[in-house]
Amino acid sequence: MLKAKRDTAAEVVPLVTLAKDVPEAEQKQVFGTAAPSITSLARNDDDRQLITLSIASISWGQLMAAPPGTPDSLVAALRTAYMSAAADSAFKADVSKQQIEMNPISGQDTENLINAYLKTSPDLVQKYVTMLGIAR
């Protein structure tokens, strides 16, 4: 959920949204207008994938992970516990009191994101690495 403080005389005009797509209605409620997602501005699929790679850390936020080989039953229990905690009203009130924005993503959705990144073609990864100026 987007949050904005309207206690200043300055107006905030969103130019583009990063990471997940924020519903237009939610943007309009907060800002009075809506902005396109950055991926919608890509000229082609390769550019869209490069943008997606660039904003991966934003999409993932603070990633919680278990080590490889963790039993499926434990992964399921951890995922359930995390989402239950995130939905707890007392926890949400404490997070809000600290002025922290929390938008939990399910473990399965996170896994799907990671798997999608891992399927990026080697040529596109090399193009991305070159764009960043990283020797490889």
Image (spheres, rainbow, N blue to C red):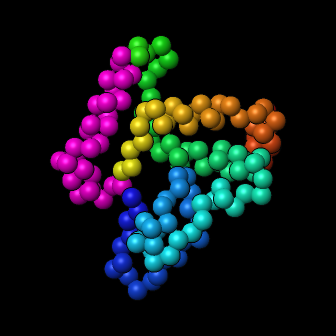
Image quarter (top left, top right, bottom left or bottom right) of the C terminus: top right
Q: Position of residue 92 (x, y in %)?
A: 24, 50
Location of residue 73 (image quadrant) = top left
Q: Position of residue 97 (x, y in %)?
A: 23, 58
How far across and down, in percent of the image, does residue 37 sit? Answer: 60, 60
The residue furthest left is 90
Q: Residue at x 45, y 77 (%)?
A: 32
Q: Is residue 7 above or below residue 39?
A: below
Does the segment drawn in magenta span residue 3? no
Identify the residue at horizontal 38%, vertical 44% (top origin): 104
Residue 133 visible to the viewer: no
Name the foreground residue: 136 vs 6: 6
Left or right of 10? Residue 132 is right
Q: Main secondary structure of the magenta part?
A: helix
Left/right placement of residue 118 relative to residue 10 reads right
Highlighted magenta segment, given as a residue range: 73-101
Q: Is residue 88 magenta?
A: yes
